[in-house]
Amino acid sequence: MDGIDIVAASFEPLQLHATLTIPFEQDLKDELMALTLPSDNEIDRMGKADVALAKLIGHGINELIKKNKLERKKIKAIGSHGQTIRHRPEDGFTLQIGDPNIITEITQLPVISDFRRRDMAAGGQGAPLVPAFHQALFQHEQIDRVILNLGGIANVSFLPAGKKENISGFDTGPANVLMDAWCHRHTGHAYDENGDWAANGSPIRALLDRLYSHDFFARKPPKSTGREDFNLDWLDDQISDWRNDELEYEEFEDTPENIQATLAKLTVRAIQKAIYRSGMKNGEVYVCGGGAYNSHILEQLRWRLRKHSWSVQTTDVIGLSPTWVESTAFAWLAMRFDQSMNGNLSAVTGAKGDRILGTITKV
Ligand SMILES: Nc1ncnc2c1ncn2[C@@H]1O[C@H](COP(=O)(O)OP(=O)(O)OP(=O)(O)O)[C@@H](O)[C@H]1O
Ligand SMILES: [Mg+2]
């Protein structure tokens, strides 16, 4: 929820022709954030955000085309994920906004969108959808690999060496969503640059255990989560329970830095456990998403995974910048739609079968 990432990509072999990020203005960001939780007059507000976001996406694409002198007629389609404002797999629905009709009007290009609902209709989580792309691009014949995306939420793709069928993947829990919110409240910055602020603190054991006792962590995959589960209100409740617990509470521990360090450790702990439980004994972890620039998290991960001699690096090392993995994945999913091929992996999402994902808005 920091902005819109746009790539112009072609495949086989993968090539990125142009990239652009359009940061959200604070007002739109606040509104999108607010829409992730129940509140007043949601339908009108969602409608307005749907239009505002679509305009930003459409004009952003035009800007990318113009700046890089791309030939519009060479662009087969736009794959537009949109912004998730609600994700409730337990109730069978997920909602991404950013009206494709408007994007097509502005760009005069076909738009493939709504990637998640078909998988849900088939009984899946509708997430994560990136593992099929990770597999196509990053699976290795001899080395076990884990692709770890650190966006708002953290998700893993397990790619055991050479085994085309045995891919798994799921959300492990929060990545930046809580750290960003906490950092913004206490420092005024949108995020903790490099994780330096967290690195100054020490994790609070009792609070960490409390946070980790959220049901989501114990649940078996397939599983996916979002801001509905992990948000500042939830965190505040946990902190206040801890403060009220005479046996656990230590006043000297109660500093904003220490809480940030605890949130970083929560992310790392969930990822470490997921990797240890994966059955893969050692190999390579490649990190993408904005959290790949959080050196504190990467150092913690290296330390936690050292016993099994996992290496931890960013996807830069294997040819794709961490910033562009997700957006490229949705260009790839649009290509799969165009070729009438599945986008989900049913073993990952829990759907009844592999499905072609998306709908098209034609010019
Ligand atoms: N230099 C940095 N140091 C620490 N964290 C960073 C840095 N750069 C980006 N980030 C983090 O990455 C986030 C943006 O990453 P990304 O775009 O992958 O997340 P997102 O848009 O929330 O993702 P998603 O929608 O996939 O959950 C920022 O909100 C911030 O938390
Ligand atoms: Mg982003």
Image: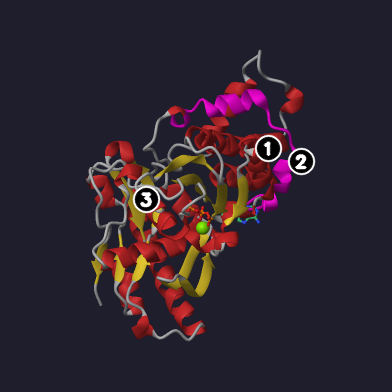
Question: Can you give x and y, in whole percent of width and height, for residue 205 in the image?
Answer: 66, 25
CB contact under 8 Å: marks 2 and 1:
yes
Question: Can you give x and y, in whole percent of width and height, for residue 14 in the image?
Answer: 45, 70
Amino acid type, label 1: Ala
Amino acid type, label 2: Asn
| Crowd tier of the residue under label 2, counting other residues whose Cα lies within 10 Å: few below 14, some 14–19, many 20 or above | few
N-term mark: 2 or 3? 3
**Outermost residue, top direction?**
247
Residue that mark 2 sits on? 200
The answer to whether 175 appears left or right of 198 in the picture is: left
Question: Can you give x and y, in whole percent of width and height, for residue 218 in the image?
Answer: 45, 27
Residue that mark 1 sits on? 261
Amino acid type, label 3: Lys
Viewer-proximal residue, 19 or 221? 221
In which image quadrant can residue 44 be found? bottom left
Label 1 C-beta lies within 8 Å of the nearest ligand 1 atom:
no
Find numbered disc 3 in the image and state the secondary structure of the residue it sits on: loop
Instruction: Decide whether residue 320 is among the magenta residues.
Output: no
Residue 99 in view: no
